[in-house]
Amino acid sequence: MDLSDLADRVKKGERRALARAITLIESRRDDHRADALALQDALGDTDRSALRIGLSGTPGVGKSTFIEAFGLMLTGQGLRVAVLAVDPSSARSGGSILGDKTRMERLSRDPNAFIRPSPSQSQLGGVARRTREAVALCEAAGFDVVLIETVGVGQSETMVAEMSDLFVLLMAPAGGDELQGVKRGIMEIADMILVNKADGELKSTATRTCADYSGALRLLRKRPQDPEGFPKAMAVSAVSEDGLQTAWEEMTALADWRKESGHWESRRAAQARHWFEEELRHALLAQLSRDDATKTLVQTLGEEVAEGAIAPGKAAGQVLAHLGKSG
Amino acid sequence: MDLSDLADRVKKGERRALARAITLIESRRDDHRADALALQDALGDTDRSALRIGLSGTPGVGKSTFIEAFGLMLTGQGLRVAVLAVDPSSARSGGSILGDKTRMERLSRDPNAFIRPSPSQSQLGGVARRTREAVALCEAAGFDVVLIETVGVGQSETMVAEMSDLFVLLMAPAGGDELQGVKRGIMEIADMILVNKADGELKSTATRTCADYSGALRLLRKRPQDPEGFPKAMAVSAVSEDGLQTAWEEMTALADWRKESGHWESRRAAQARHWFEEELRHALLAQLSRDDATKTLVQTLGEEVAEGAIAPGKAAGQVLAHLGKSG
């Protein structure tokens, strides 16, 4: 594979080249991994910077409809939009049943949009590490906005927030009692809460829910990375497209404020450090499965430890000694 | 240091030798670590097995008073009792303000008791790894019961449960509303809930609280490791010593049932595997701080990553290459 040619085509914004580059970084083959790192080298520092928006919402909240309407609005304004997914279920099942493209048919046909389903890796950490690299590729390909969507369960939201400039929570209109169910940790990482389905019968419920969230957000301690009025709750409708433009204006206003105040840059620096540590941790643990001899040793010692024939600390020491010798 | 002499004296149950052995395993010096592993080798497989009881309770619940009364009752019956602590605050502050011995004066003077405060390590994981090895030393020293106490916050309870045969939760008498505050995860690892302070004015409240917990425990899914009637809630008084003997009988009955049914052995095997994995993970990550050259490389690359001069994945690869070369 001619990596410098691939890098050039990615930089020109060719969607097929971008797709191929992402496939390369998602591969678990050692030679592909080396190529992926070489590709990142060949891309170099393009000085291109997208607005990375993390978006979470539980199933049924209308996430696909929202992303399609929001994405089409942005492409309509001449912006290029990439949509990536971090799907915890792909870590278990090896991929969603329905591809993301089926979900967002109109957006996927738009030449200024690029949609990529979640990488299927065996662990959520692997999904997140590869998605973070895909974000950087989309940025190098000149996309203006990268939407990173995830389902509102477990650890995936924190991981998506760790690769986003802004984190948006999409919620459904709900009764006051249900507000309790929103995990405090998620409220604390959200920059904006969008209450979707503010249309038709649900409009007044959505408005009320939005007011409830606004109240709840005001109770949170003010974070240094927020200007006056943030985090913010707003009602939107993906179906009638009401509020989408306003939501976009709020997002860019927040991004601009953070850029001016220096929070943007320090957040990206902290995130890069975080991913360095994650890659390092992963690479160190991966030593345990680097060859059959090591795997067999770990397996055998694990059984001896379980039988009480050897102490856990001593067994660990033997594995390390083996890695040192055969490294 | 003559390690085989130290091992012999530990096996004879000498408390000073045991204290010295634990100091050795808690040390972070590399040569001490090698000695600690050699000591564990010298002790070999003694075939001695204590009942390892994990005990958690928030401050104010009367944990020290309970342990002292419970421990003295057991030593009064001719049993030898060791008390170890896993204190998450020692991971931050480098030790509790008051030593555990001050808290349990009578028990600490009892020749059949051994009390050891929490190791002061920089991370809770380190505290837990060393405490687990101290449990094994107490067992080799012929103690019949090892109580591993922790404060009811954060991760420390899960870690203590991972080194215990039974896990006991000590609670204060409380109104019905406060029951909600008990984290579901803790209820799920508890084998027994003891409602303390069932004496004087609080006696009826304690009895009611105990009934509430019994009801809550019945709602949990039955676990294979439990005989009929477990997990169980009981009211006790550490001050009047009411219920302590019954609690002990329930604990031994549960232990006997688990031994007969095979759950005891499989739990210990699973725990040993868990600690092997923990030791392995720790040892792998410790490679990053094994010498100044490595520390400097990680530091420098971390700064370059933060500045965007190098991609996180590539920087991690450089650290691994360095470890391989100089290993």
Image (cartoon, coloured by chain):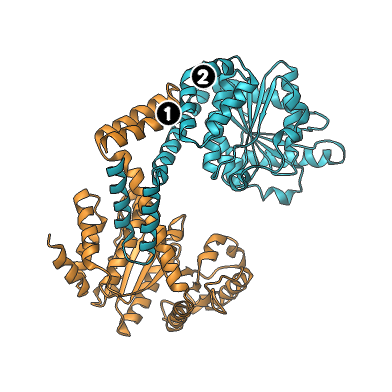
Chain colours: A orange, B cyan
Dot in front, 2 or 1: 2
> Picture coordinates of residue B237 (x, y %)?
79, 33
Quarter of image, res A110: bottom left
Give amino acid for label 2.
Answer: Asp
Q: Chain of mark 2?
A: B
**Total residue callouts:** 2
Q: Which residue is mark 2?
A: B2
Identify the residue shown where x is 29% and y is 31%. Answer: A296
Tell me: B1 left or right of A325: right
> Picture coordinates of residue A223 (x, y %)?
56, 70
Tell me: B225 left or right of A275: right
Tell me: A32 left or right of A106: left
Q: Residues within 10 Å of mark 1 (few under 14, many from 20)?
A: many
Identify the residue shown where x is 36% and y is 70%. Answer: A147
Residue B4 to residue A179: above or below? above
> Picture coordinates of residue B262 (x, y %)?
50, 22
Q: Nearer the viewer, residue B102 or A213?
A: B102
> Picture coordinates of residue A264 (x, y %)?
44, 73
Q: Which residue is mark 1?
A: A314
Give amino acid for label 1.
Answer: Lys
Secondary structure under the numbered disc 2 in the rendered image: loop
Q: Residues within 10 Å of mark 2 (few under 14, many from 20)?
A: few
Q: Nearer the viewer, residue A273 or A146?
A: A273
Label annotation for residue A128: none
Q: Nearer the viewer, residue A284 or B4?
A: B4
